[in-house]
Image (spheres, rainbow, N blue to C red):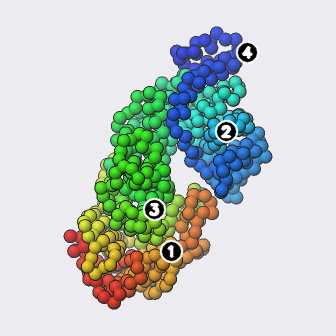
Amino acid sequence: MTQKTVILNILNESFPGVKELYSVRDEEAVSAFASFFRSYLDSTSERFFSIPYEKPENIYKLPAESDKEAADRISSGTLISVGIPSVFGSVNSVDWHSNPTYNGYKEWTWQLSRHNDIKHLAHEYRLTGDKKYAEAASALLSSWIDTCPPPAADVPGDATDTWRTIECGIRMGANWPYFIYSFYKDFSDELLLKIAVSLNQHGERLQRNHMHGNWLLMEMNGLAHIAVLFPFLKKADEWRAFSINAMEEEAKKQFYKDGFQYELTTCYHEVAVNNYQRLLEMLQVFDTEMPSSLFSVIEKASEVNIALMEPDGALPDINDGSDSKVSELLKPKTRLFDNPLLLWGATEGKEGKAPDYDSIALPYSGFFVFRTGWKDYDLYALLDSAPFGRGHQHEDKLSLIVSNGRKRVITEGGCYAYDDSPMRKHTLSSFDHNVLIIDGMGQNRRKSYKWNDEDIDKLSDLKWKISESVDWAEGMYSGPYGDDESSPAVWRRSVYLVKKHPGLKQPVFIVVDRTESDAEHEYCYLWHCDSMRLSIARTSALYDDISVAFSEGGELSVTRGAMYPVGGYVATGKEQGMYKAVDRLEYRVTGKDKRVVTVFSFSDDLEAVRAGGNPDCADITLVVDGDEVILDEEELRS
């Protein structure tokens, strides 16, 4: 097949300028096509760069490395994926199929082919004009295209090490367009043709082999970018209609009515929202018709970040979540939405309008956020009474996290590297969350889990009430435990934020756990405390910024930094080796039907908690500085 035939096979002959290519001689075809391609990019470059630059998502810099130092390192052939560098010696020697990790961590190879490094070179080139970055980018891109051919048509979207469809979508929807527009005047005629052919190959694979869930959003955003930014490709019109329709349909399937994306993780919620952000902004800039329904869905989804935000301005890392700074996530959204609440979040309260609520329920996704206000010194807690997420789930129903101002003091597993290590398995399990362990077993919804599309319209089992003096919320778990998926007990957790009470100088959180069963069990309540321990007793523990006290009848122990089995650790990031030791408080009681009361106070004057141990009881007595503060659950709920 001649180069001219290759060119004409991928082009739409009705697009302006394409017909002229039919008449050029074979030996002039590549040069003529490159001229056509550059002319098109010349005419649209200003429009493209009106979309503000977005940093690559993957970790591509070393600690303390400047952007220029990172670009120089990349130009010398040292590339980073998932935080781990590999020294290839030169940009001409990169092995895109390699894996330098000690345990064959597949994400290294997969994410290398997202081409964040090349995008970084492009950005630095636009700032400095240094031609060495263009030369390095040319070598890297050419070597990838030459050594990573697309798979056969029947290869599934999640197969291969360089052409998984998630990588295809990210390349096309986030990275390739930026460096094509940045370097097209420096790329050789031959490389521009390789790029065009690869764009066409990406389009074919994304339409034919796409997956589902958050992958589909990245895939369709990538396909839409190919179609809209490179409309001279033969199937551009078909790809545009296909991808935009898919994105519109997925918005109905993937977002609960309260705005949370159905994986119920703060990381992949933002992945979903961000891909719609990229799509809508690109369509807007290139005067392409946009589905109006998407705006309301994405606007509400953006507001979820404010609802969930902790006092330090970051998100709680729910499930495989993220502790990203909310203001940074919302800044791009203000370009799409004239929304005073989003502006308030994006400017950290300097502009816009503050929320008209403190505590809030997300009734469909099943989360309740407690807060005493929106200052960075306020108290905060999050109760997870959510259904099992569509993906990236943890076995953590009814887990509770608590923040004392800017410090999260009762924490949980977090999101660890996507490997098969004991630490990864631990962070996914109940044993790294603030939940009930029964007879040494954790929750096991994953084993028989199946998502049904109609579940997106269902309310969760969350119950709640918000009042001036007390906010409360409650959830229930009666699902499977352990490998045999038994259901040993019904567990109900009620959480009270007592904001005002005559006997209390400051607010407290009261957690009431009720279990009902036909048989005797050991009930073990886990609480992960990320603070400096000052003292511990049989039913209480005192830390420098929180005290934890349990009703009598059980016994308290602590696990910290254990490896066999793993316990008393939480992840500090998604890279391998990023975890730290914390206290895992373990409060054990034995029986059938039990009631355990746990109180979180933020001073050292809470001496004891007394409460009836039968599930029908409602009494709670706090001993504070020698005085008894008598409470009743029925009154707290009224």
**Residue, disc 4:** 27
Q: Residue at x 73, y 43 (%)?
A: 75
Of residues 336 and 190, the one nearer the viewer is: 336
Q: What's the residue type where badge 4 is placed?
A: Glu
Q: Which residue is drawn at 33% across and 55% down?
A: 355
Label 1: few (<14), some (14–19) or many (≥20) C-alpha neighbours in 10 Å = some
Q: Name the residue under label 1.
A: 531
Q: Which amino acid does label 3 sit on?
A: Asp
Using the numbered discs, state the Cα–Cα distance from disc 3 to disc 1 in whole angstroms.
16 Å
- Whole-angstrom CA distance, mark 1 to mark 2, is 46 Å
Choose mark 3 or mark 1, whichever is in front: 3
Quadrant holding the C terminus: bottom left
Q: Which mark is residue 49?
A: none
For marks 1 and 2, give the one nearer the viewer.
Answer: 2
Residue under circle 2? 128
Foreground of the two, 191 or 49: 49
Q: Residue 27: horizontal and vertical position, in percent?
A: 73, 15
Percent x, y for residue 257? 32, 48
Say few, some or many: other residues with alpha carbon within 10 Å of mark 2 (under 14 / 14 to 19 / 20 or more).
Answer: few
Nearer-N-terminus badge (4/3): 4
Q: Looking at the picture, does residue 411 appear above or below residue 23? A: below
Q: Which mark is residue 312?
A: 3
Q: Which amino acid does label 2 sit on?
A: Thr
